[in-house]
Amino acid sequence: MQWEVVIGLETHVQLQTKSKQFSGASTTYGAEPNTQACEVSIALPGVLPVLNKKAVECAIKFGLAIDAEMAPRSVFSRKNYFYPDLPKGYQISQFELPVVGKGQITIQVPAGKNTQAYEKVINITRAHLEEDAGKSVHGAVEGMSGIDLNRAGTPLLEIVTEPDMRSAAEAVAYAKKLHELVQWIGICDGNMQEGSFRCDVNVSVRPKGTEKFGTRREIKNLNSFKFMQQAIEYETQWQIETLEDGGTIQQATVLFNPDTGETRAMRTKEEANDYRYFPDPDLLPLEVTEADKARVKAEMPELPQALQARLISEYQLSSYDASTLTSSRSLADYFVSLVNAGAEPKQAANWVMGALSAKLNAEERTIVDSPVTAVQLAALLKRIADNTISNNAAKQVFEGLWAGEGEVDAIIEAKGLKQVSDTGAIEAIINEVLAANQAMVDEYKSGKEKAFNALVGQCMKASKGKANPAQVNETLKKMLG
Amino acid sequence: MINSSLKQLGQQLASKQVSSVELTQAYLQRMAQLNPTINAYVTIDEDKTLAQAKAADTRIAAGDFGPLTGIPLAQKDIFCAKGWRTTCSSKMLETFISPYDAHVISQFDAAGAVNLGKTNMDEFAMGSSNETSYFGGVKNPWDFDRVPGGSSGGSAAAVAARLCAAATGTDTGGSIRQPASLCGFTGLKPTYGLVSRYGMIAFASSLDQAGPMAKSAEDCALMLNVMAGFDERDSTSVNRQKEDYTRGLTSMTGDQPLKGLRIGLPKEYFAEGLNADVAKVIETAIAEYKKLGAEIVEVSLPNNNLSIPVYYVLAPAEASSNLSRYDGVRYGHRAAEYNDLLEMYMKSRAEGFGAEVKRRILIGTYVLSAGYYDAYYLKAQKIRRLIAQDFVEAFKHCDVIMGPAAPSTAFKAGEKTSDPVAMYLEDLYTIAVNLAGLPGMSIPAGFATSSEGKALPVGLQIIGNYFDEARMLNVGHAYQQVTDWHTRMPAGLENI
């Protein structure tokens, strides 16, 4: 039988706010345990939550970015359960009325072994605001578990998709796209190691061609794209094998173990909590007006889709180049600064995607900490355009810039890379080469075109690479008559 | 001096006839004598109290003082006060020392008032007789065999026995007004949102409201001036212009100072369930209001009979969630022995909470459970809106509503403890006001005689429209200008 996997994602995006979702405590990562836990984070008797306006703005930004329906009025609810890292005994979340409703994200699924690259629209069901829990710390004290409440109350936006994905590749493409988007609009730092972007993946399988969904299992808390791919592939295979062996799938929550590459059930539906959701009486309904949306929209950066279209129409870039350059906000920012500093767009694109990216990859750096600034690179490209240096020489200048040897013109000067364009000097070089290579000249004259290229090569060599190649070409042609 | 009004005490302090330390010591002495019997206070800390009194004297000497500077007050033990043990009269918080101040506490601190101590209450404010307190019951100063009402029973007894100049209370279903009625003083539950709930230990968040408990309407106005005001730490706190609640009190002159006032009497408040002696006192008080120029109109609150069932769905639902934080993990009672996490939770909570608290957590958990939520919680919310709508209709025909605050006078300790429903009926006339979020107050209106021949106070309830506290206080004040019920003291306690 042919099986089809059906995947939906719930992603917890930690919002980039200075303070917590419902209190003024700091959200900085990595502080000493419980040093960022104020009276509200600890849930002392009598404390009350106050909604973080910045977190609401983040939610609105996301809603605008995916062109979602946004509720004019949404409600915070309490999700009640006991756990040592949940100080109030309930999590404040949104249940019936989330702040962001239906929207869409278009993903690019890369080519696989037997498949071509394609685009697909993933429907977003909802996105809602909630607070994170703290952490249990095991082993710090012998025989006891510790609780660190620094993270308790950190603002999260939980983004839920429809079960629209049909392969691990699609799920990963969606997760990557979402990861880029939330960083692009500045609502999340995207740091997966620190847990700023965590995915729960719902996986089920069904016979291909059937309508009815199979029973799903939810893989919790995946914080790397590689693990996500592995976990989904393992889980899919496990479910198919279980069904083919005549077994049934129990609805369950599972954990992925990166060491074994396997998923393992944590709890089944029967053991699931009754969360007793009800509207939190400590918080008023959240009102989002058209004016709020307009104000947030004015502060939003150009979205990747829009910028991509503009790169194609305004700068005549190919759709591949435009898509690559808008794959992250920082890369796009770099490119746009480069063009704004006077670089020719196509040439700029080639350099950013070529030499610069290669060097960054080689040194495992991101574009944000590129030693060569956009302004420096623009100055370098200008020297190519005005024939001061050749393309080859430019690569040496780039290395110089990377190594911090100074500004473009100083490096050209210091390395003596200035291109020779003086007609007299070039004629002198050509004369020398022609005199020394009579055999090649004869070959050319007898009709062998290749000999011409060899002569150009000799001229360039004689000039130590500094002669302007176009000019050498032209003059040589003239002189050979 | 112990029977002086806040205004009189303020004048004596300002003119340095008495210092705050002297005044405070007088109260502390009285507390030392009477509190072992009455049990109004659960925490007394003379050093802290006297330090505040000294600070107040310094402020007075420097000319930097307000109407309450140096005045000794009692604080219900539901308000977190920095450095003070704050227990909510529960074993769960028996050893909890608050590291922060509730908004109400910091407001009084800023005003220079002196904190005499923390008063007894029903555990987590769940009760109408103060008998659910982990620290034991409180005696009604008018008859030691009887309860002071609840949940603010300690504050009530402290005001009635003159163990403080005034006190704070909280009112979720009647916890200020019912004890005010049973102990014979003036208590006001403000409009929901007028006084910040920050640092006030939550029972039922959508109903809880702090308010003053004092001898007179004028005293309550002075207290409310300090307590009311926007606080951004409470999202349900209402951001509105500060007002002076004493502003209309002095203009109450002439034969008919209340001419033009329309008083609505809900027919449902004078039906079955109301004790005949109480009814008589209320009728006499209404007659007095007529003399003051008020016009009487009959109004109807047709859904009032639903208010108790609705309350006993919604309040426990919120409470079951609000009390989840008492899990033995971070503070509060933790069982001495347990084998695993679940057992730690279960034993800590089983040991830390009393029977009434457990009963309400169970009810609340039940009504919020999957499959029951719509039938109980959602339905109760719908009826709550109908109850609020009843008042909107009634206030189209009147300016204030009057009636009894409690169906009977103070009952005997133990009389209703085995019958929760009988206890719940104590709040028949007060609960709807909380459900609607309206302000309500109870003022002393006379006495009924007990079977043993003791005089027991009866309170008249005045319900106002939203944020109409100033008018209600004026209405109470006008009555207190022509009556002296509010100045009476329990027999035997006058000369201690």
Image: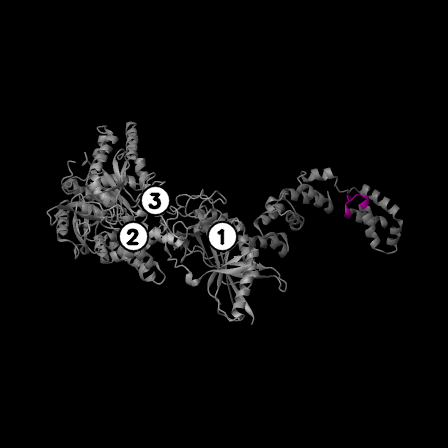
Residue A465 in the magenta stretch? The answer is yes
Q: Which residues are magenta?
A: A461-470
Rendered image quadrant of residue B358: bottom left
Q: Which mark is residue B357?
A: 2
Cα separation between marks 2 and 3:
22 Å
What amino acid is found at the position of numbered circle 3 in the picture?
Tyr
Host chain of mark 1: A
Q: Residues within 10 Å of mark 2 (few under 14, many from 20)?
A: many
Q: Residues within 10 Å of mark 1 (few under 14, many from 20)?
A: many
Host chain of mark 2: B
Position of residue A201 measured from the top left corner of the image (x, y, whole percent) = 50, 59
Mark 3 in CB contact with mark 1 (< 8 angstroms): no
Cα separation between marks 3 and 1:
30 Å
Look at 34% across and 51% down and name the residue there: B349
Position of residue A103 measured from the top left corner of the image (x, y, whole percent) = 49, 58
Position of residue B487 measured from the top left corner of the image (x, y, whole percent) = 16, 40
Q: Is residue B297 left or right of residue A328?
A: left
Q: Quadrant of the N terminus of chain A?
A: bottom right
Q: Which mark is residue B60?
A: none
What amino acid is found at the position of numbered circle 1 in the picture?
Val
Q: Which mark is residue A13?
A: 1
SS at mark 2 in the image: helix
Colour setting = one colour
Magenta segment main secondary structure: loop
SS at mark 3 in the image: loop
Q: Is residue B129 above or below residue B7?
A: below
Mark 2 in CB contact with mark 3 (< 8 angstroms): no
In this view, which residue lies farthest toward the left?
B453
Towards the viewer: A89 or B354: B354
Which residue carries the number 3 mark?
B198
